[in-house]
Amino acid sequence: MPVRFTLNGTPMQVEARPDESLLEVLRERCGITSLKDGCSPQGQCGGCLALIDGDPKVTCATKASAVEGRTVLTLEGVSVEERALIAGAFAAANGLQCGFCIPGIALRAKHLTDRHADPSRAEIARAIDGHLCRCTGYVKIIDAIRLLAAAKRGEPLPEPCEDGRVGRSLARVDAARTALGERRYVADVRRPGMLHGALVLSPHARARVVRIDTGRARAFPGVRAVATAGNVPGNRWYGLLYDDWPGLVAEGEEVRCAGDVLAAVAADDRHTAREAARLIDVVYEPLPPVLDPAEALRPGAPRVNPRHENLLSRTVIRRGDAAAALAASAHVVSGTWTTQRIEHAFLEPESAFAEPLPDGRLHLLTQGQGIFDDRRQVAAFLGVPREQVFAELAPNGGAFGGKEDLSVQAHAALLARMTGRPVLLTLSREESVRLHPKRHPMTLHYTAGCDAEGRLTAVRARILGDSGAYASVGGKVLERAAGHACGPYRVPSVDVEAVAAYTNNPPCGAMRGFGTNQAHFAMEGCVDLLAAKAGLDPWEMRWRNALEVGDTFCTGQVLEKSVGIKRTLAAVKDAYYAARREGRAVGIGCGIKNSGIGNGVEEWGRARLVVERDGTVTLFNGYTEMGQGLLTVLVQFAVEVTGLPAATFVPRVDSTYELDCGQTTGSRATLFGGRAVVEAARKLRAELDAGRTLAELAGRVYEADLVTRDTTAVGADVPRIKTHTAFGFATQVVILDGGGRVARVIAAHDVGRAVNPAQCEGQIEGGVHMGLGYALTEELPCPGGIPATHKLRELGVLRARDMPEVEVILVEEPEPEGPLGAKGVGEIGLVPTAAAVASALEAFDGVRRYRLPMRDSAAARSMSVGRRR
Ligand code: FES
Ligand code: FES
């Protein structure tokens, strides 16, 4: 049916299906890319916001036919002057991270500030209630909107920082284009002749696949290829640590979780591909799923994965005689803490683009957290040498660990190979929730003791994690939980075991803080319980036990440098005691988080600085920018060393050079990637110091390939244990108001060196936001192994008006092994948060909570999100 409307001032007439959304029409047929599809047709993220006759509407939940005769405004149609103000405000305030949510919020901000000249922070938070941001904690988004309002009142807009030296808050690379929706995420890519892919996912947690009948789909008009397991020319099974995950499940095999892929379709457009996928008939023989990790480990339990026994991993750490130390302790506490499965809820669903190149190679545009791992696995899937795949990082709309495993890259590549045409494959929100690994639910049995003065004597911990159907990095997550089982404290005797088990639940893998968050919830609970027994307040108890240089970490590593936990405790001391004196319910939590995977893993930092003929320097590195600000920080290292302006450096992540560093994980990209950039930049600097100009150096490539091999495996029997290159430390204080609502969070973090203070703050604000959700509202129940919901709003992610005031205190305890003193900050933002909230809740109502999320609390009930209330 024809629909006539005015788009950004231009009359349009488009053909639309009766059920077609306005979002689909605008993105697919009108070339609008500022509208982002984070959840269509749910209407729950706000990414697709447009102004229809001046009113803000989510276009994924608006039929195209509804705009007949009306006007539609997107950011593309906003005046040049106002676009400049919007871009400038978000860049100056550092009001964006991955940026996927920002164009929608920016248009909302325009609407708000057109009507309200000076909105307060609370009014802005209410105005953006229809938008979700998973990265920022909304703090700097609200700052940006305040700046925009001021600018529209005629006040001068602060210039975005262009000073790229270390310690300055250089504006994020590409900030302006990101804010305006001009930066192209994978799903925004268009090519002549491009096909769209769609997948068929299992509806069962466990079933035998009797038959896959693709006949009706193949005959469907517009379908160009249908792929099943038999079409995979190479290794159909992939995985980061074990090849235990089939990209396509074959007839006769079992599906092992509700996100398993049975078939893939390529068609002329996305709608046709999805219609055709629905025509694929799969006959299943349902089997009883294994859903309890403890049951999975019992003798005789059905084997979940044919490539590995149900026991995925067991990590053991023993130092001293914990049993004897506990028996001799003045005070002993025990308890069982349980943590929930949660969804990453990155705003950009998984998407991959694959295109055959004229030279026979395949161009893979991926938003994965390790493009070289993506390339390796996709090449193996296709049965070609990896050099046949040119991998390139697309802008990544959030990941948080959820984009480490392959998702749709292999399927897009296979369809491109089968058709000889470019293929774009983008998941819906529902498919995204079903397909990618989650945060591990864990059960943690703890016993801890201290002496009469409150000094910790021993910790005994037994931890069981549900890794779901595939290994992903589940063994590493439980290894991390074991290694961090004692928190940032000096514990002389340690007896820890952590086990990961396969089940038919959705896979669990990496998620921000992986394993440490769960362990800290339990250990910090023990510290609070022991403090009460020893007659100490929680701050004093932590101060007496906090690690210092020369102390031994849980794994046996003697800490030799950059141990800032006591400085973070000192930084919050006055505010903590002031709140107590005021009679406020106040809680405290401390945290430690490895920077670098460590545990004996070889780790790389690789960089190339390539001097171009136009006077710029392309900065290649092997790690992924996913909103954390890595590329901006790497530019700052290059600026600091070379003395060249920030605008000289153009960061790029692709496989032009062999820069494989593995996954962007474990808070390590700044640490190792930064070291490589510093090294390469020193070589360039030496040439500049010798009097050469950039013009003279055009074409030169400055290389750095730095390997770190000095860490030791957990439990290794070696004279000098060094499980990790570096650690971040934090103390957070949570203060409730009189009604039990979280009113304020003070987050003091030892970041080594704040390379970009505004970005550092942003990471911590976003971490606190995620940590509060983890503590109070977030959960993804999976009854029968099937996610109970696919709706973004039902995942419990906090909205802007749920966020308390967050005060970030940056403590700099330089890390000698880090680049110019820096260490990773990406994960630790939420490591202490749940424990600090639990501590505050107990101060409020006297109830010590052992289970996340703590929905029974007044703090949770005061949140606007969260179902089951
Ligand atoms: S895509 Fe429309 S609200 Fe999320
Ligand atoms: S910046 Fe908001 S979702 Fe990433």
Image (cartoon, rainbow, N blue to C red):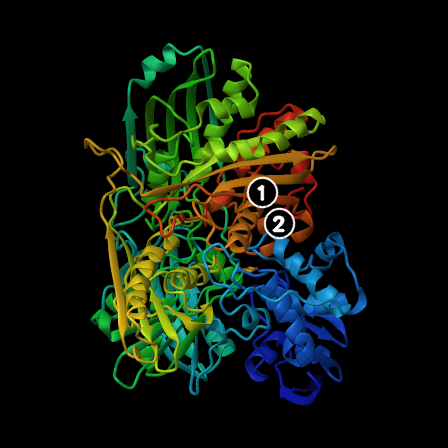
User: Do we see residue 497 in this rendering?
Assistant: yes
Q: Crowding at label 2, few (<14), some or many (≥20) Cα neighbours within 10 Å?
A: many
Distance Cα–Cα, label 2 vs label 1: 8 Å
Q: Is mark 2 within 8 Å of ligand 2?
A: no
Q: Nearer the viewer, residue 829 or 198?
A: 829
Q: How many marks?
A: 2
| Residue shown at the point (50%, 75%) measured from the top left | 188
Image coords of residue 356 (percent x, y): 32, 81
For numbered disc 2, what is the local secondary structure?
Answer: loop
Position of 460 relative to 429 (above/below): above
Q: Nearer the viewer, residue 303 or 593?
A: 593
Q: Crowding at label 1, few (<14), some or many (≥20) Cα neighbours within 10 Å?
A: many
Q: In what quadrant of the picture does the N terminus appear?
A: bottom right
- Locate residue 153: give its quadrant: bottom right
For numbered disc 1, what is the local secondary structure?
Answer: helix
Tell me the amino acid under the disc marked 2.
Leu
- Would you say the residues marked 2 and 1 are in contact, meaning their CB atoms lie under 8 Å apart? yes
- Locate residue 848: give its quadrant: top right
Position of 349 relative to 25 (above/below): above
Q: Earlier in the sequence, mark 2 or mark 1?
A: 1
| Residue shown at the point (40%, 29%) measured from the top left | 548
Tell me the amino acid under the disc marked 1.
Leu
Residue under label 2: 798
Q: Which mark is residue 867?
A: none
User: Do we see residue 253 in this rendering?
Assistant: no
Image coords of residue 629 (percent x, y): 47, 59
Q: Is mark 1 within 8 Å of ligand 2?
A: no
Q: Nearer the viewer, residue 283 or 539?
A: 539
Q: In what quadrant of the picture does the C terminus appear?
A: top right
Q: Which mark is residue 772?
A: 1
Please state if 548 lies on the left or on the right of 708 as rendered: right
- Locate residue 8: give its quadrant: bottom right
